[in-house]
Image (cartoon, rainbow, N blue to C red):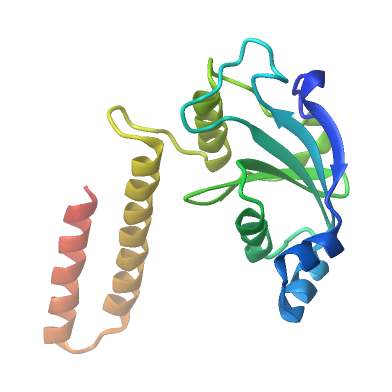
Amino acid sequence: MFALPATTEIKKSLPKKAIYEKFGLKSAQRDAFDVDISRIDIVNVVSPSTVPGLKEGERVKEFYVLLVTLKRQHCDEKNILLLTKLIKQNMIFALVYNDMVRFAVVHEKLFAMDWELLEDAALPLMGLDLDKVWENLVTTIGSFEVMEGVTMEEQIAIDGEKLKKIKAIEILEKKLKVEKQPKKKYELYQQLCELKELLE
């Protein structure tokens, strides 16, 4: 499945009821989870023992691919984040709705790809060890690149700060358009210029 080696394939269902009981989810959490998710299956485990020639990483020893069958296409991100809190493993989520799939991963934050046909979906294993394979999958799913000289975690933080500034600029630009008082308008303009300088 997903163009991964046959040696990585497993079929292990994670019953929702067992998840609820094991982690003592409150009734509101159970209801929200149940509205979005039909079933969860572990379909692949990628490790040196399942992929000959692939070395163990310093940080990543193995990772799992979870097939999450959805009841509706747009599920609440909180339910995916909840799974990562409950199951302390490196996981790639294949969110499936009808004949479409969307890969997602949580590494510092939640990243998700666009929807694609299930039959065309692939998770390429690029790298000599699991640290590099994992990094390549996270950056592919997250659609970002790691600049030279920084770690993936640092890059995610840098991109997060940049996104905050972009949003702040958008808010200031909207305020500037509707502000009538010249003094206040000038102050907003100054703030906008400072933020744009920081962004460059």
Residue 199: image location, x then y, percent: 24, 52
Which residue corresponds to the image point at 73% horizontal and 20% vertical from the top-left? 50
Residue 86: image location, x then y, percent: 66, 58
Q: Is residue 136 above or below residue 54?
A: below
Image quadrant where residue 156 sits: top left
For the question of whether residue 80 can be seen, the reply is yes
Residue 115: image location, x then y, percent: 71, 45
Which residue corresponds to the image point at 16% horizontal and 85% vertical from the top-left? 184
Q: Which residue is farthest top? A: 53
Q: Is residue 131 above or below residue 168?
A: above
Question: Closest to the observer: 170 or 24?
Answer: 24
Question: Closest to the observer: 180 or 24?
Answer: 24
Q: Is residue 18 above or below residue 61?
A: below
Which residue corresponds to the image point at 30% horizontal and 34% vertical from the top-left? 150
Q: Is residue 156 above or below residue 76?
A: above
Q: Is residue 127 left or right of residue 53?
A: left
Q: Is residue 94 left or right of residue 136?
A: right
